[in-house]
Amino acid sequence: MSLSEVDFGAMAEVAVSVGVNVQPGQRLVIMAPIEAAPLVRKVAEAAYGAGAKSVRTWFGDDLLQKITLERAPEEGLKEFPAWLADGFAQEAAEGCCFLSVLGSDPDLLAGIPPERTAIATNAAQAAMAPFRNYIMTGQVAWSIISLPTWPWAKRVFPGLPEDEAVDRLWQAIRQASRIEGEDPVASWKAHVAQLQRRADWLNDLEIDRLHYRAKGTDLTVGLPPTHLWAAAGQTNAAGTVYVANIPTEEVFTLPDRSRVDGTVQSTMPLSHSGQVIEGIRLTFKEGRIVSYSADRAAGNLKELIETDEGSHYLGEVALVPVDSPISRSETLFYNTLFDENASCHLAIGRAYPFTLKDAQEVSSDEVFMEKGGNVSLTHVDFMVGAADLDIDAITKGGQSVPIFRSGNWAKPA
Ligand code: ZN
Ligand code: ZN
């Protein structure tokens, strides 16, 4: 099946009505690979149907990005156009909503020296920081959906011919994204409510710290006194409820940046800046990563951790059972949006201020850090969940409560 034959109607509907939740009179900005044009057209139709004022699209091309990283002089890699970064920040300031479409080859940039990729990534992250702030603080509605491109499908289903691999990946995306049923919008609402009940339970426990135990992992993660467990369905500054990731299965909060101790081992490959990193091991002391290694693409892990001071600390703690639909599909997507929703994960780098109960008091990075939050140019999730993972919560009252047993929730929702 070629992408022009795929029926993207249900995906477009969920992206518009559940994901960014386009409001009448609102503008929508879409960032997508050029292969996504058939999907983007469907999204535009759905958005205008929901009353959007305008839909603008910023198309990118992975192979062009690769050529740039191979051929451009270092001076060129360091430049990120200010007008582009300002444009995105302005759209956000004016209350636009933002939809990203993913579909990259997980190993697109294998063979590019990690230092060159890091130069371009850091330049983009620094320039886009004001825009990213709108996203990270949840002031604007944003969402991410996926497209089954051939370069990605080839990695997930090696050995299959193009049509079959793309078709299988599309089926896997549809299943994981919960767009298969009669009324995907209604089933999303039920799913969001169930995740919220998990978050409520964890919030009621008043947890001081979590203790993770699994093969290669013995890690204690302290939580800030005012941490807030969140799940799909955030509310932006205008009061619109949006779902930032399609799919999403996680319940998450932020760690206390200076109270993480012990060792953790990744359980799934991580596709990061165009290369798959495997076998990550990190050791923490008082929150800081004091040693690290990887079995594959160790240079990319190094560039990630050495991005800045904040990338030596954690910014997210997320719980996902191994019996989640994505995990049960036993498909390794080599795409963090999917793989993180098949597994408990942690993130290196910046924390989300909205995962604090007193987020409205966070007026600066300094205040955020005083409350236990972490600040960095980067935020990268890596997977730590597996069928042998046990997690206990130690409450503020000193009680130990089982949260996860053998990779799953210790208690029904
Ligand atoms: Zn997450
Ligand atoms: Zn994350």
Image (cartoon, helix red, strand yellow):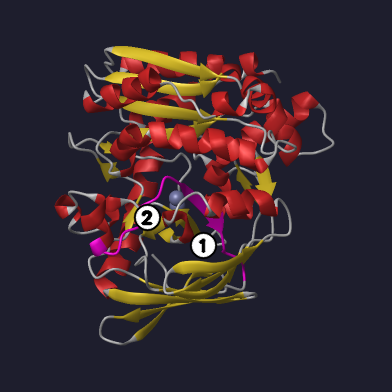
Horizontally, is 140 left or right of 243 in the view? left
Q: Which residue is mark 1?
A: 321
Query: Do labels 2 and 1 touch, CB within 8 Å?
Result: no
Q: Is residue 190 above or below residue 256?
A: above
When the figure is inspected, residue 165 is found, relative to residue 49, above or below; the finding is below
Q: Quadrant of residue 387?
A: bottom right
Place of residue 81 in the rendered image (x, y in percent of width and height, measured from the top left) = 43, 21
Residue at coordinates 21% horizontally, 16% vertically from top-left? Answer: 25
Q: Earlier in the sequence, mark 2 or mark 1?
A: 2
Q: CA distance from mark 2 to mark 1?
A: 12 Å
Q: Amino acid at mark 1?
A: Pro
Q: Main secondary structure of the magenta part?
A: loop
Whether residue 182 is visible to the viewer of this picture, yes or no, is no
Q: 86 or 92, which lies in front?
A: 86
Name the amino acid type tagged 2: Leu
- Residue plotted at (63% across, 35% down): 171
Picture coordinates of residue 344, whole percent (x, y): 51, 61
Q: Using the image as rendered, state which of residue 72 and residue 214 is in the foreground.
A: 72
- Describe residue 317's horizontal placement relative to residue 170 as left or right: left
Q: Is mark 1 within 8 Å of ligand 1?
A: no
Q: Which residue is mark 2?
A: 195
**Does 274 lie within the magenta span?**
no
What residue do we see at 80% from left, 38% from top? 158
At label 2, counting other C-alpha atoms closer than 10 Å, the crowd grade (few under 14, some 14-19, many 20 or more) is some
**Residue 409 versus residue 392: which sits nearer the camera?**
392
Q: Is residue 376 magenta?
A: yes
Residue 356 is situated, as x and y percent measured from the top left of the image, at: 25, 58
Which stretch is magenta? Answer: 370-387
Does 49 sit above or below residue 381? above
Residue 378 percent location from the top left of the image:
45, 46
